[in-house]
């Protein structure tokens, strides 16, 4: 069984490396698809994005902002199953149901960057079967821990896990950058060092990815509202503020 991976970026390559099947890459940039196929240490090839071939499994591995369109365009090429690793779940699964209702349909979300694999992979199954069971086994064999979750539960959690978290870290980085002087290393505290390390990790990523996360899950508005509440809280009321959060 051959797997078509639509999107030869970071997560498409991660998925291709994790599954045991032969792989075909399709990408808007044909050269990137060729490079991904060449980099895989087993049988792989590149195919045109508009290929009319059919494949056992189609994996959509594109940015969240174009996930539903990619599912609509490529799910019909699947003989057995359609899956995605885009990062959101409800919208891709709904698109799969519209375009490929007779196929197995599963959404996978690796909760890590590819260079940090293996790790935890969230899984939402709309229609399982032998092909997607095989994908699950391959991901587990690669050392990943699979956690089953409803798509709504996943997407709601990502509003905090990704949307609010990334917004808070980037807000810290922006505020620190706006300071008139840099913090001397000798004056850094453990909390500051940890936040600075997190900011460096986020800033080392791809800006478009974080933009897509904000567009999909939001978070920045909630962080802004929380910061405004903090700024307006009287020092005498900090006990109540802390109790609200701790509770």
Image (cartoon, rainbow, N blue to C red):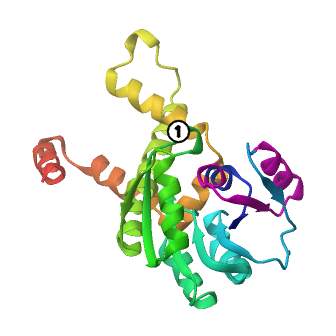
Position of 16 relative to 204 (above/below): below
Q: Quadrant of the C terminus?
A: bottom left
Q: Which is nearer the eye, 135 or 87? A: 135
Q: Residue at x 41, y 73 (%)?
A: 151
Instruction: Where is residue 106? Give x, y as percent.
Output: 51, 73
Q: Is residue 111 visible?
A: no
Position of 25 relative to 166 (above/below): below
Instruction: Where is residue 244? Give x, y as percent.
Output: 15, 54
Q: Which residue carries the number 1 mark?
A: 116
Q: Residue at x 80, y 51 (%)?
A: 37
Q: Quadrant of the N terminus?
A: bottom right
Quick check: is 30 in the magenta stretch?
A: yes
Q: Which is nearer the eye, 81 or 215? A: 81
Instruction: Where is residue 142? Give x, y as percent.
Output: 51, 46
Query: What kind of element bears circle 1?
Result: helix
Give the left or right position of residue 234, taking residue 195 as reference. Answer: left
Residues shaded magenta: 15-39
Q: Is residue 246 visible?
A: yes
């Amino acid at each position: 069984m051959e797997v078509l991976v639509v999107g030869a970026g970071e997560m498409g390559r991660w998925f291709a490396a994790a599954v045991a099947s032969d792989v075909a890459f399709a990408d808007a940039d044909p050269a990137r698809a060729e490079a991904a196929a060449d980099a895989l240490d087993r049988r792989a090839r590149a195919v045109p994005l508009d290929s009319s071939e059919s494949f056992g499994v189609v994996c959509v591995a594109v940015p969240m902002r174009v996930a539903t369109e990619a599912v609509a365009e490529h799910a019909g090429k699947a003989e057995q199953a359609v899956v995605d690793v885009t990062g959101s779940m409800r919208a891709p699964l709904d698109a799969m149901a519209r375009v490929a209702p007779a196929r197995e349909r599963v959404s996978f979300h690796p909760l890590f960057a590819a260079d940090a694999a293996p790790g935890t992979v969230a899984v939402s199954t709309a229609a399982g079967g032998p092909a997607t069971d095989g994908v699950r086994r391959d991901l587990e064999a690669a050392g990943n821990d699979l956690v089953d979750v409803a798509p709504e539960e996943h997407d709601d959690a990502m509003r905090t896990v990704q949307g609010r978290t990334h917004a808070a870290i980037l807000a810290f980085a922006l505020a620190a950058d706006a300071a008139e002087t840099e913090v001397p290393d000798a004056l850094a505290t453990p909390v500051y060092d940890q936040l600075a390390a997190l900011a460096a990790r986020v800033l080392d990523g791809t800006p478009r990815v974080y933009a897509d996360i904000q567009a999909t899950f939001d978070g920045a508005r909630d962080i802004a509202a929380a910061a405004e509440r903090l700024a307006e809280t009287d020092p005498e009321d900090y006990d109540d503020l802390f109790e609200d959060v701790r509770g």
